[in-house]
Image (cartoon, grey):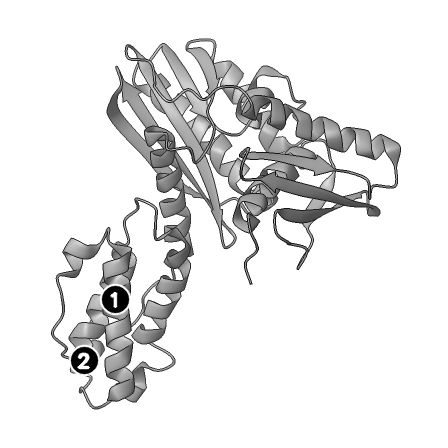
Amino acid sequence: MVYQSQNELQQRAELYIAALQAVQIEANIVPDSARDYLLKVAIHRNGQAYGLVSLHHSPKKNSFKITVNEIRNPAIAAELQGCWQPTISSDQSPPTDQPLREGWAVYVDGSFITERIGYGAVILQNGILAHELSGSVDDSTLQSMHQVAGELTATIEALTWCSANGVTEIIIYYDYTGIEAWATGAWKANFPFTQQYAALVNERAQAIAIHWQKVISHTGNQWNDHADALAKRAALAANLPVDTTSTTSEQSTPTSDRQNLQPTGVFALIEDRYQRLSPYREDAIDFSDLAHALQQVYVTLHVTMPDFSAMRYNFDGLESAYIALKQGYSDG
């Protein structure tokens, strides 16, 4: 069962957890704690449990808050409030949807999907798309930072690109407070990667004038949403298994031998990709991995198939083709 605001609360909880990690407070979402407009996070430090923080969401105000009445240590409670407050005050600033019309700008974002981290950056010149950057973050030591590691990596990659291409001034649009806070010293960088990030940004700042601008995520900002889509696509691509099934053996499989497709092989590969991509059906990303897997099975079964290359951005169309395939399989 999915509760009201559960997805929004989980996203905000992950950001909060990353901010807590920066001050060496361990936290995790409590399993099965979600209720309508409520989610709980367990707090630990040095192996000691301190209680639970409750996260609340108000859809009408589009705002979040925390309560710490279940935290037993007043000093820890104050730290927890302090880590939350910068996020709240930043989110209350008015959104900036338009990049600089003259000069360079970049939107950065990160994503964490089933244990893999992706990053995305959209670089604009005079308000026009100039370059895109995306990829996965494969350092296993950064897993606990979730999408924050992707956002930091996106910023690093964008500034590296600027240095290589002679860009001397840029505005960086971001939706996670730590992107600016660690770089400027507003937040103390306690972990090796945040220290590395702060040092690199300050090094690049010797040759590049960097301006920071926070935007509110998922509010219809074109380029922020585009950076988010790039990061999600990169994380998803890192998750997809390698298809080791021989094309020759697939195509030689007779139509009547459909039992070979269940539950292993290419048919299972479709299900894997469908389940991984389904939560992002409304996003403007490329679903070609699912399209390719569907095409393989349609060819194997000698079934008349639609033009999957034209459907790669249409999740609903791919889903309909998958349903028709499963229906035909069960009828056969």
- Please provide percent x and percent y for residue 222: 32, 31
Where disc 1 sits, the SS reads: helix
Q: Quadrant of the C terminus?
A: bottom left
- Please provide percent x and percent y for residue 238: 40, 52
Q: Can residue 246 be seen?
A: no
The structure residue drawn at horizontal position 28% and vertical position 13%, both measured from the top left corner, is 101
Q: Quadrant of residue 53?
A: top right
Residue nearest the observer in this picture, 143 or 90 = 90
| Residue type at tag 1 | Ser
Looking at the image, residue 132 sits to the left or right of residue 207; the answer is left
Residue carrying label 2: 301
Reply above or below: 263 against 271. Answer: below
Q: Could you tell me how far apart the alpha carbons at marks 2 and 1 are, in whole angstroms? A: 17 Å
The structure residue drawn at horizontal position 67% and vertical position 42%, both measured from the top left corner, is 55
Residue carrying label 1: 320
**Residue density around tag 1, few if under 14, some if 14–19, many if 20 or more, within 10 Å:** few
Reply above or below: 47 against 252. Answer: above
| Residue type at tag 2 | Leu
The structure residue drawn at horizontal position 29% and vertical position 21%, both measured from the top left corner, is 124
Q: Could you tell which of marks 2 and 1 lies nearer the N-terminus?
A: 2
What is the residue that sits farthest to the front in this orientation? 60
Reply above or below: 206 against 239. Answer: above
- Please provide percent x and percent y for residue 95: 45, 22
